[in-house]
């Protein structure tokens, strides 16, 4: 039997006399060393090194689009969409030419959608979610009904919390959100229904439930570490997505209208980003097989969790903290540039040579999301006495591309992406780092839903890419005794 002990709040599994695993430990992979089990062949862990690394020249020989990228870095065209457009360059006879970035939802510039709702001092995420899912801007009556439908689905099903996977040894909220989403499949009387009505209802229920689900998982983890009782936040009807997120996370200290309005901007900017991003493509790949909505969205969450996708915002936050702690004068461009050069030369921070938050697969001269969010974040930063921190991030944005060009010698156009500011803004709003990517997922659900429905009812063909086999031929089977 395996016994669970704790050290610094983390679970440690230790063997007892018997080899059987209990139901908790059985779910966690354990090293063979120390369990009285015979050692396995080294080939189990290192055999792939000889057989799974394909020579780089073969990719060129067979014209393989690694990462679904063309040789010029642009994405391989794999589909058509009416949902959004992500513009960052122009393809001409001379190749890829950089251009100012633009993001368009259903024909409307995202900058206009945000500017109008902010000018009217109203929350805009629900309007944008309706636009993405229904394909048109809602009337006041339609928007009110849309929000009421989400409200009606905020309550978790009876009996759900009793088996909710709130305790997780991985302490990663995204992992919990995945399992919580899959668990909702069991409470749906017809979970495999892929009719438009059911698809929209599932999306509405997740829009209502995900903020509270993530908050419960976050609170449960903290309660577990502190050995305290879990307090489940109540359901608030009439709250928008931005208000709901802040309410369930900051119920005791409260939040201001200005904070909720800034979070609303972030939710709109994360709501959709074309079919070519990894998590949306994941949604479309699974949806093309005809699988249920819960499975498709859980897979999208798993994709977004990756540090190369939605998880990048946390890495940026760590880097900014590192720069802030090593640069004596934040207002000195020479000092900031000098330390950024150390990062690019792999002499500082994580020694990866990357300035996180700079560069994007599509955007070249500017990321419209970064441009927009700076516009609305500056005032809140000033009100909270964080203008100097905001200025430091802007310095990284301004100086970083030139440092990268000087050190690496690349002439590629590089701009800041929204991740450079995301972590700072969430931190400024009192949101803890383990929830950054979960909030991203809550916002992106609207876009995922639109793409899932477009794949189900439009494309109508299972996505099945091709891989050429380059393995050696002619191996004769060797009997076990002769190996």
Image: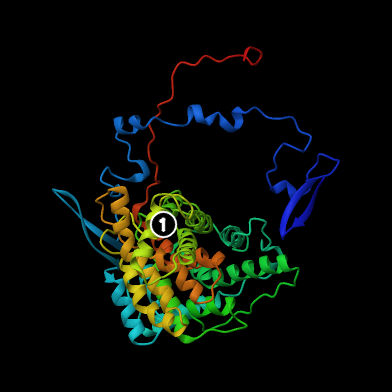
Q: Quadrant of the N terminus?
A: top right
Which element is circle 1 on?
Answer: helix
Asked whether the viewer can see residue 449, the reply is yes
Q: What is the quadrant of residue 458 in the picture?
A: bottom left
Q: Residue at x 39, y 34 (%)?
A: 467
Q: What is the quadrant of residue 222 in the picture?
A: bottom right
Q: Residue at x 38, y 87 (%)?
A: 121
Compared to 449, does 57 lie above or below? above
User: Left or right: where does residue 197 sit relative to residue 98?
Assistant: right
Front residue (pair 421, 318): 318
Front residue (pair 402, 282): 402
Q: State the colouring used for the structure image.
A: rainbow
Q: Residue 99, percent across and down?
A: 21, 61
Asked whether the viewer can see residue 126, the reply is no
Residue located farthest toward the left when viewing the structure as drawn: 93
How many dots with numbers? 1
Q: Residue 278, percent across and down?
A: 41, 53
Residue labelled with disc 1: 280
Q: Residue 193, percent across and down?
A: 51, 59
User: Left or right: where does residue 137 sit relative to residue 286?
Assistant: left
Q: Residue 352, percent across and down?
A: 44, 49
Front residue (pair 384, 423): 384
Crowdedness near tag 1: few (<14), some (14–19) or many (≥20) residues, C-alpha within 10 Å: many
User: Left or right: where does residue 288 sit relative to residue 406?
Assistant: right
Front residue (pair 93, 155): 93
Residue located farthest toward the top when viewing the structure as drawn: 482
Q: Quadrant of the C terminus?
A: top right
């Amino acid at each position: 039997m395996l016994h669970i002990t704790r050290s610094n709040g983390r679970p440690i599994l230790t063997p007892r006399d018997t080899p059987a695993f209990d139901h908790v430990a059985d779910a966690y992979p354990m090293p063979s060393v120390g369990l009285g089990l015979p050692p396995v062949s080294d080939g189990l862990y290192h055999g792939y090194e000889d057989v799974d690394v394909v020579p780089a020249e073969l990719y060129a020989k067979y014209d393989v689009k690694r990462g679904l990228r063309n040789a010029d870095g642009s994405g391989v065209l794999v589909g058509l969409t009416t949902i959004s457009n992500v513009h960052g360059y122009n393809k001409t006879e001379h190749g890829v030419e950089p251009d100012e970035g633009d993001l368009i939802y259903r024909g409307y510039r995202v900058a206009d959608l945000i500017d109008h709702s902010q000018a009217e001092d109203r929350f805009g995420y629900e309007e944008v979610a309706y636009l993405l899912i229904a394909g048109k801007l809602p009337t006041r009556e339609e928007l009110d009904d849309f929000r009421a439908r989400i409200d009606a689905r905020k309550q978790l099903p009876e009996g759900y919390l009793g088996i909710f996977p709130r305790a997780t040894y991985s302490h990663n909220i995204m992992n919990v959100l995945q399992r919580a989403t899959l668990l909702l499949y069991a409470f749906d009387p017809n979970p495999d229904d892929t009719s438009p009505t059911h698809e929209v209802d599932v999306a509405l229920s997740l829009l209502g439930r995900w903020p509270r689900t993530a908050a419960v998982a976050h609170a449960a983890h903290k309660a577990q570490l502190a050995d305290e009782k879990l307090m489940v936040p109540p359901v608030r009807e009439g709250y928008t997505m931005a208000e709901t997120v802040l309410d369930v996370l900051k119920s005791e200290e409260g939040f201001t209208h200005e904070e909720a309005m800034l979070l609303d901007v972030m939710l709109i900017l994360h709501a959709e980003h074309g079919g070519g991003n990894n998590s949306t493509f994941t949604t479309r790949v699974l949806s093309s097989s005809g699988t249920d909505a819960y499975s498709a969205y859980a897979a999208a969450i798993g994709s977004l969790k990756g540090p190369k996708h939605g998880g990048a915002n946390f890495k940026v936050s760590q880097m900014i903290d590192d720069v802030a702690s090593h640069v004596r004068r934040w207002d000195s461009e020479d000092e900031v540039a000098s330390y950024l050069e150390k990062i690019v030369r792999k002499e500082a921070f994580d020694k990866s040579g990357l300035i996180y938050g700079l560069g994007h697969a599509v955007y070249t001269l500017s990321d419209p999301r970064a441009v927009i969010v700076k516009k609305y974040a500056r005032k809140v930063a000033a009100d909270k006495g964080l203008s100097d921190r905001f200025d430091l991030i802007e310095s990284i944005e301004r100086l970083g591309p030139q440092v990268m060009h000087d050190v690496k010698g690349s002439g590629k156009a590089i701009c800041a992406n929204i991740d450079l500011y995301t972590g700072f803004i969430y931190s400024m709003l009192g949101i803890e780092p383990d929830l950054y990517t979960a909030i991203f997922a809550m916002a992106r659900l609207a876009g995922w839903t639109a793409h899932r429905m477009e794949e189900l009812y439009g494309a109508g063909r299972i996505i099945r890419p091709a891989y050429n086999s380059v393995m050696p031929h002619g191996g004769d089977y060797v009997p076990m005794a002769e190996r």
